[in-house]
Amino acid sequence: MASDRYIDFVNSDLGRKLVGAVGLPAPARLERWQAGRLRPVEGALLLSTGPLAERVSNFAPRLTDVLLSAGGEVTGAHPWTAEQSAKIKAVVFDASALLRTSELSQLREFFQPILRHLDNSAHVVILARAPDAQTDPLAASTQQAIEGFSRSLAKEMRNGGTVQLLQVEDGAEDQLEGALRFFLSPKSAFISGQVVRLSACGQQVQDWTRPLAGRKALVTGAARGIGAAIAETLARDGAEVVLLDVPQAKSDLDALAARLGGQALVLDICAPDAAAQLIEHLPGGLDIVVHNAGITRDKTLANMPADFWDSVLDVNLNAPQVLTQALIDSGVLRENGSVILLASISGLAGNRGQTNYTTSKAGLIGYARAMAPTLKARGISINAVAPGFIETSMTAHMPFALREAGRRMSSLGQGGQPQDVAEAVAWLGQPGSGAMSGQVLRVCGQSVLGA
Ligand SMILES: NC(=O)c1ccc[n+]([C@@H]2O[C@H](COP(=O)([O-])OP(=O)(O)OC[C@H]3O[C@@H](n4cnc5c(N)ncnc54)[C@H](O)[C@@H]3O)[C@@H](O)[C@H]2O)c1
């Protein structure tokens, strides 16, 4: 894996001076979740007033030891003051009651005073309503306006700070704790500028220290890279893991499966009998399917051989479709399960030399959107995770200039780690993840590509 020496340099004493003088980008060292940590927010959580914020105040003491309020009284919180309060590690602003253009000034009034008092790697979440669920056009316009605000604020954050917008449908308030435990903590270190919609969902995590306890997960392409990180993170969170990869990867796969106390399954997902073999090896059923196995065979379209096209479409798109359908039809995928598809931001943006790859990744996004309504009746969620530039052996082999561009062309100014993608997958695999379905979660540091 390529190491990002530039981050080490800009965070050294000499680097800081030089970078400041020349005006180069200064990516921060991002704080990440360590196994064994309990509190989602280690530091002060600042909460606004509002109907959804009121719900948050009920469970906020489970998120942090230091609860502060701004803009009015919040149960259990001390009022924030610039002079006396500690630096702010996390912020929740409830914008759900803003229904008129004139009320949008509350965004500026709330955020402006606090921005210079944010700690490193601070996480901001704005709570709102889905614009298309508003019957009043002015209310819909106001709620849509908040999206523009949150995406821009994400671009203005410094020192590794992130901003997300959660659109909470009526009845989805119960799912706020799970979502905030993810978006206010270092688990979402490399996610910023995203809009996520939460719908009502009957499921709930029972034990936040092991949110995936009792769930069985299959991860394809698990021998290395992002897939290995996913298997590791799901196991950390209590899931029983089945790791799948091709015969050539058997020794790495066996070693990882043994370390995680999981099961190794050597299988080519494109084999004609792949679905039958999978079903045979999963007699007890499955709760989480992560379609991570993926390949690239890059060439401009003018030079693309048929086998480059076919193999990429086969592995990346056809196999996930065939296997998902088989797992559903056979009943192996249990009720309230989660299907997670590894897409890519290039599937949203397009990429020169990757017509085959981007076609496959966009196809996965379409598949998640189209399947979500059908699977809802059984409580199964299906989402795509779209990584941006992630530091893996795949990106280590890119030409230097492309690799540097990939790293810096994002609000966080760096590549992500496989763990960043894995944390997003683990969150989507939790009971209650059905609150989010048919959506794309980008893990890209707010890359400018496909934004
Ligand atoms: N690395 C990035 O920056 C990045 C960015 C966006 C999306 N992604 C996506 O994330 C996923 C993982 O990427 P990675 O960088 O870890 O890739 P990787 O090449 O390091 O790992 C992919 C794994 O999939 C396995 N695999 C390939 N074909 C298979 C098949 N037919 N059957 C079973 N297993 C198979 C490989 O053996 C390998 O272990 C891929 O879907 C990739 O497209 C990666």
Image (tube, helix red, strand yellow):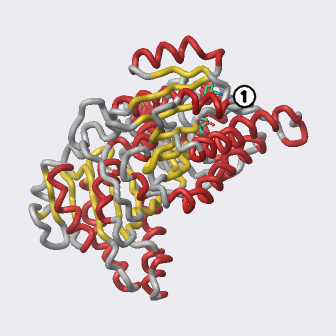
Look at the picture and state if 61 lies above or below 413: below
Look at the picture and state if 283 lies above or below 56: above
Q: Residue at x 20, y 68 (%)?
A: 54
Label 1 CB sits under 8 Å from any ligand 1 atom: no
| Residue 178 coordinates in the image, percent (x, y) | 31, 52
Which residue is at the front of the view, 362 or 221? Answer: 221
Q: Is residue 166 left or right of residue 34?
A: right
| Residue 365 coordinates in the image, percent (x, y) | 62, 52
Which residue is at the front of the view, 394 or 383? Answer: 383
Give the position of the N terminus as an image quadrant: top right
Give the position of the C terminus as an image quadrant: bottom right
Which residue is at the front of the view, 102 or 278? Answer: 278
Q: Residue at x 63, y 39 (%)?
A: 323
Q: Is residue 245 left or right of residue 353?
A: left
- Dividing the picture into quarters, in which one does residue 247 lie? top right
Q: Amino acid at mark 1?
A: Ala
Look at the picture and state if 71 lies above or below 190: below
Q: Residue at x 45, y 81 (%)?
A: 134
Residue under label 1, please give it: 271
Q: Is residue 27 left or right of residue 363?
A: left
Q: Is residue 155 visible?
A: no
> In what quadrant does ligand 1 lie?
top right
Q: Circle 1 — which element?
A: loop
